[in-house]
């Protein structure tokens, strides 16, 4: 057989095979030759900026401080007393926090957490004993007026509450966290003592992201009060809050603000306190504190409740 005949027969067989094959319609995902499928880009979701977990937790305290603490730091205990169940629910949030989440927070947020826990618990203790019932006998003692919070027995040592499933009192929080673990004496001016001579409450919770600013504001605010600091140049005296005494918070300033070069006539704790104060008062007062000839006196503490009802 000639080559031409073989080629003809082969071509004929191929044509017959193609004719017998079923036709296939192009599918939805098929691309015709020479065509390029356009890129399909999923619509972008709007940016959602979620607050950090710590900030979200601190936010839970915001309503209490905003609603019941005024700009002078006075508290509407009369109204807040009717919200005691809300205070309990809020303290339950501190108890239910996962310790692993807490450990993941920056140190500033941990400090804010314990300050807020302390202040909320103080509010709960006061409202649980409001109005204060005083003893006629004790009223005659210094600091024990009819509206003194000292009439609440064991206010710092006897009232227990749970934080992350661990039992605390106010005194235990102060000792463990504010005197040891964190050891920043500015913290003491953020803690409520529920009294006129104490640092005033803020109408907002503390937040890690602005903690330094809040603490510095608290110190300046406290030192601007006649209960905390004043100078009598005529008598050559500097008057300081009783909280600055060595037996109170005074010694807590030594590690960070202790100094030997200035205030040489004073004891170490007092030198540290004066050195600390010079960061927050006027230049004129700083000049007097650093080179003036004066004695230091402590102001009698007024334990009258900070009631703004």
Image: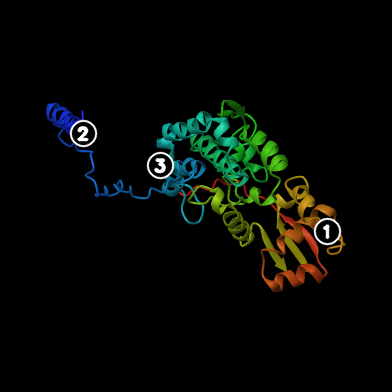
User: Distance between the Cα atoms at labels 3 and 1?
Assistant: 47 Å
Looking at the image, residue 281 sits to the left or right of residue 194; the answer is: right
Q: Identify the mark at residue 259; answer none if there is no mark.
A: 1
Tell which circle, 2 or 3, labels the residue nearer the N-terminal end: 2
Tell which circle, 3 or 1, labels the residue nearer the N-terminal end: 3
Q: Residues within 10 Å of mark 2 (few under 14, many from 20)?
A: few
Q: Residue at x 66, y 63 (%)?
A: 280
Name which quarter of the figure residue 2 lies in: top left
Q: Label 2: which residue?
A: 7
Tell which circle, 1 or 2, labels the residue nearer the N-terminal end: 2
- Secondary structure at badge 1 equals loop
Q: Are marks 1 and 2 in contact (CB under 8 Å)?
A: no
Q: Which of the two discs, 3 and 1, sits closer to the camera? A: 1
- Residue 54, horizontal then vertical, whole percent: 52, 42
Q: Nearer the viewer, residue 21 or 129?
A: 21
Q: Label 3: which residue?
A: 79
């Amino acid at each position: 057989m000639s080559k031409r005949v073989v080629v003809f027969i082969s071509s004929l067989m191929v044509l017959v095979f193609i004719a017998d094959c079923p036709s296939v319609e192009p599918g939805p995902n098929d691309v015709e030759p020479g065509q390029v499928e356009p890129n399909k880009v999923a619509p972008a979701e709007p940016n959602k900026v979620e607050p950090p977990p710590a900030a979200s937790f601190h936010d839970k305290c915001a309503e209490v401080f905003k609603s019941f603490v005024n700009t002078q730091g006075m508290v509407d205990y009369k109204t807040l007393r009717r919200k005691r169940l809300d205070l309990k629910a809020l303290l339950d949030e501190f108890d239910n926090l996962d310790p692993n989440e807490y450990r993941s927070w920056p140190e500033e947020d941990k400090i804010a957490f314990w300050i807020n826990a302390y202040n909320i618990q103080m509010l709960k203790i006061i409202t649980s004993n409001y109005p204060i019932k005083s003893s006629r006998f004790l009223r005659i003692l210094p600091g024990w007026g009819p509206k003194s919070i000292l009439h609440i027995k064991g206010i710092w040592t006897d009232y227990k509450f749970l934080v992350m499933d661990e039992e605390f009192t106010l005194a235990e929080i102060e000792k463990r966290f504010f005197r040891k673990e964190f050891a920043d004496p500015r913290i003491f001016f953020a803690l409520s003592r529920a009294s006129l001579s104490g640092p005033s409450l803020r109408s907002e919770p503390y937040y890690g992201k602005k903690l330094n600013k809040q603490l510095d504001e608290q110190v300046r605010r406290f030192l601007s009060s006649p209960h905390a600091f004043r100078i009598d140049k005529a008598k050559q005296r500097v008057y300081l809050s009783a909280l600055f005494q060595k037996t109170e918070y005074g010694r807590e300033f030594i590690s960070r603000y202790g100094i030997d070069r200035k205030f040489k006539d004073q004891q170490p704790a007092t030198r540290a306190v004066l050195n600390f104060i010079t960061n927050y008062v006027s230049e004129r007062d700083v000049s007097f504190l650093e080179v003036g000839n004066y004695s230091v006196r402590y102001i009698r503490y007024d334990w009258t409740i900070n009631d703004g009802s």
